[in-house]
Structure formats: C-alpha cells, structure tokens
Amino acid sequence: MLLDFEKPIADLEAKLAEMKQQLDVERNEDLRLAVRSFEDNILKLKRETFQNLTRWQRVQLSRHGDRPYTLDYIYSITTQFIELHGDRSVRDDQAMVGGLGTIDGQSVMFIGQQKGRNTKQRQQRNFGMANPEGYRKALRLMKMAEKFGKPVVTFIDTPGAFPGIEAEERGQGEAIARNLREMFMLKVPVICIIIGEGASGGALGIGIGDRVLMLENTWYSVISPESCSSILWRSWDYKEQAAEALKLTAHDMLHFGLIDGIVEEPLGGAHTDPVAMSRIIKNTIISQLTELSAIDPLVRIDQRIEKFSSMGIFQE
Amino acid sequence: MSWFTRKEKNIHTPTELKREAPDGLWYKCPECKKVMHTREHKSHAHTCIHCNHHEKIGSEEYFELLFDNNEFTELDTTMTSQDPLGFSDTKSYPDRIAATQKKTGLRDAVRTAHGKVNGMEIVAACMDFSFIGGSMGSVVGEKIARAVDHALRNRIPLLVISRSGGARMMEAGFSLMQMAKTSARLALLDQAGIPFVSLLTDPTTGGVSASYAMLGDFNIAEPGSMIGFAGPRVIRETIGKDLPKDFQSAEFVLDHGFLDFIVDRKDLKNKLFTLFSMLQ
C-alpha cells in the first residue's frame, strides 16, 4: 500500500533496485557511482518529503495499512508476554488487548487498542474501537498492575470509542470517565504512547499517564478531521483543512504542552522499518521507567494531577 | 363588482400592533402544545402543568430554583475563552465567542456558585446550553475544576448540572484535556469523601458524559433527558440500523443501571437536601 506522497519515492527506489541488479552483473565503475548518487538523491527526496509533511499527510501515515499495531510492538519489545483477557463482567473485548510482558528484565503491564490487518481481523478487532468492556478490561489490568507493583504502559491507536447500541447500553461514557478518574490515582508509573490514531475520549480512556508520548506521525485530538469537516462544512471533503484547523500532530500537541514528548520515527515512517521503530520504543520505555521509578508514588500522583490540571488557555 | 374595494393591496398593520396579549404572558408547551400562564409555568419549576415536559432552562433559572432566596456567591465570574489554535470556520472563534456572549449575556458555558439549599451550604456548577451548545472548552474545564476545589476546601457537597453537546471542537486538544482535568480533581474529591451529585439534563452527551457528568457518587437525571456518549446520528450511520424507541433517554439509562434515580425538577431542591442531609 502506498500513499500518494510515498509513490515518487517508491518509484525511484524500484529503479534503484534495478540499477543495483545491473551493477551486480556488470561491475561497472561508472554505474557504481551513478547508483551512489542516485541513492543520495532518494535520501534527499525522502528527507524533503518527510520534513514537510502536511498535517493531513501525517494523519494518513498514522493510519497506514502497514503500520505496526499494539501487539506487533508488544511482541517485538518483550522477551515474554502473557496476554490476559476479559473484563470479568460482560466479555472479552478484542479491540482492547493487554497482558504482562518482560522488558529489559522487568515486568510491565501492557495495554492498548488493537486494529486488524485484513477484513476478518478488522471485524474481530472492531477497527480498534473498544466497547465499554474494553475500557473496563483495561482498568482491571491497571488495578492488577498496581496490586503487584508493576508499571503500566499503554499503546493508543483508535479511531474512537465504538458508537453502538450495546456500547451505550453498557455505559460507554461511564466506562471512559471512570478510567480517567482511576488512572490518576494509580500508584505505579504510567506511560502512554500514541502509536497511530488518538481519537478523542476513546484514546484518552487509556491516556492518563506520567508521560504521554506521541510517535512522530500520529495524531491526537478531540475529533477526527473527517468528523470535524462534516460538522463544520457539512461534508467529508474538507478533511485537509480540518486537520490543519485542529492542529492535531505530535509537534502541535507538544507545542501546546498537551503531551510530554515526541518519539522519532525512522525516515519514511514507522511502517518502513518496524524493527528500528520497536527498538526506539523499547529504549524510550526503559529510560522513562527508570526516571519515573525514582519518584515517590504519591509525588508521582501529585505531578500527574498537576500536569493535566494546568492544561487549558483562558483569560481572567 | 364588490361593494367595497381595497385602496391598497395586502395587509399593512405591523405585527406588533395586532397582538392582543402582551408578550410572554402565555407559555405554549412544545411537547403537548397546550397553553398555560407563564407565571404558572415558572412556579412549576419551568415544567409543563399538563404533560410535565421539562423546559430546557439555564444556570440563571437553576440557581433561582436551588438557592434559598436566590442568594449565592458566584465564583470565577470573569473567566473567558482564548483562542489557542487560531480556529476559524464560518466565523473566527473569538468572533463566535464575542457574539454568543452578547446574545446570551453569559461569559461561557458554565456558571459556578456557592450558596445555601434549605440552609445547607453547597457548591453548584450549572452549564448553559445556549452558549455554543454547552460545549466544554478550557473555561468550562477550569471552572468545574475550581468548583471541585472550592467544595474540597470548604468540605461542602458539590452539585454539577450538565447540559452539553460535548467537547468544544474549536479548542481541539485543549478541550479534550478538560475531561482529564475535571476527572483529576474529582478523584481528589472522591478521596476526601465529599459527596458529589451529578445531575444530567437534556442533553448530556460526548466528552461531558465521558467525564464529570458520569462521575457522581450519585448520577441523577431529569425525566426525558437525552443522555449518551455518541450521538444518535453517528450510531445510526455506524451500525446502519434504526435505533430502539426511547434509546438514550434518561429512563433508558436508568434501566441499564447508570443512574441512581430520575428526579422531577419540582422536587430537585428538597430531594438534594434530603440526600445530602442523610450523608452528614
């Protein structure tokens, strides 16, 4: 799958591969030089493209079909992982996954929304849109982590909490609200990383952390650009303008002080080098946990509350 | 040929001269279409004397209903919105705020106050739907948070009356984080063991229903209020099915276990007093 701005690069890369093949056969010095300068040009184009992405292009990257999802990251950064299921009340919501994993020798509770890669999986994962039982499962696992003194790491990647009849019947609003309140009081360190889409309350429902980080090509806002467009312009066609207006990228959110940091992606986006991306995420988690573990739990809770309490711009 | 011919065509009497009754003397219920005297409607806490339809009222009316002799101290009266994103749709956000302020006489979508209910001190926050759909931006979040702090400091019960379409899009990320901010302060109130009643009125949806409105020790609602996380249009479009009758009504939400009780507005003050007294 290629996005329009990935296309020119992919075309050149295909040509480069051809030239390299030819080089293998011919062993020609001129050709070798040509290949090298061609490689430099591609790198330059890549840098130019990815340094000047529009907000909408970053939204597109955040939804890229090849982008690693929560379980991809969990399995690649842990040496062992035991998935845990169910909210102990209704059922197991497969749009929200979680479990205990070992990273750098320590046990961590991982939680996150999970998307599917093909039609069947997407259905099974409900496109990463959790129902109330998903949020309650997440809370159950967080409380378990607290009980055993293990830190919590959440991976956020959702187009929103599921808007459905059963979701309303089982209290979608209440489930998210409760998570917000309870996450503030967790005595263990909490790190939240937006790895794809961070849509509104559905994202925030597992997003109260001592550190809230965004991967470089993700978005986090109160509404998706499409929904914003449909409300403001009564049509989905103005999603680019909506994305601009919402200022929803990692850079915007950091600039506003609404997140704590940006996790750089490999040039070309997380999907072009999942191994490198996982390594960066792993190192980030390890270093942040080291910092957070040194803080007294009650102080950590105070700082968490203080941080979110200071968010807001108004005049008196 | 008729006996009388009009000298000029059409009717020329201005509408205001034709009225028989002075403006505002009669109230017509939008639900049952029956007419009653405005004074009677008001004395019934702005509910219909025939069908009990609860009119959508604002903070001014609620404070008058709640506080003894309509006496209260309003908190944070001067707080107004800024435009952190430079947001503009058909109108720029600052222009929209200014126009709404002028039209409604309100500063933003919530007012907070400290006063007495049958002699008992409480803090109350009340949302105004007339202010950009009761949407929650930085001002709403901050004022609710401070109302919670006020309840904490003075160790008095908190009442929040919600009537809101959800988060304010024009403040994007900032409005989302107000859900977190208000929940953070409510966590502290919860820990301190100070009672919090959340009254949900018509409508309470979106980010407000997924934060403070659903975090009461007691979640109560006015009859017939529309309460839900996602709007009915979004749900219908997502699942491609018609929605059941009375879906997302207060009665539906009560039935599914997310409300403690439904309260008739006429009983609100006394019921609140009884409830808070029982906790003392």
Image (cartoon, coloured by chain):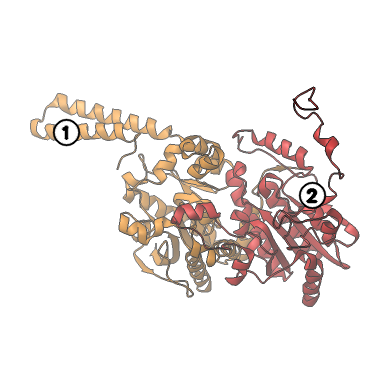
Chain colours: A orange, B red
Q: Identify the residue at image location x=82%, y=31%.
A: B13
Residue occupied by mark 1: A18
Q: Is residue B152 left or right of residue B181?
A: right
**Number of the front mark, 2 or 1:** 2
Q: Are marks 2 and 1 in contact (CB under 8 Å)?
A: no
Taking the image as drawn, is residue B66 in sight? yes
Determine the image quadrant of residue B97: top right
- What is the CA distance from the residue labelled 2 to the residue labelled 1? 69 Å
Mark 1 crowd level (few <14, some 14–19, many ≥20, 10 Å Cα): few
Q: Nearer the viewer, residue A255 or A126?
A: A126
Chain letter of mark 2 equals B
Mark 2 crowd level (few <14, some 14–19, many ≥20, 10 Å Cα): some
Q: Is residue A269 above or below residue A188?
A: above
Q: Nearer the viewer, residue A302 or A14?
A: A14
Q: Is residue B105 above or below residue B31?
A: above
Taking the image as drawn, is residue A157 in sight? no
Quadrant housing the C terminus of chain A: top right
Q: Is residue B139 left or right of residue A191?
A: right
Classify mark 2: helix, strand or loop. Answer: loop
* Amino acid tagged 2: Asp
- Count all numbered tags in the image, as a single digit: 2
Residue occupied by mark 2: B76
* Amino acid tagged 1: Glu
Q: Identify the residue at image location x=81%, y=47%.
A: B77
Q: Is residue B249 left or right of residue A8?
A: right
Q: Position of residue A23 (x, y in %)?
A: 13, 32
Q: Is residue B210 left or right of residue A152?
A: right
Q: Position of residue B227 (x, y in %)?
A: 62, 60
Q: Position of residue B210 (x, y in %)?
A: 59, 59
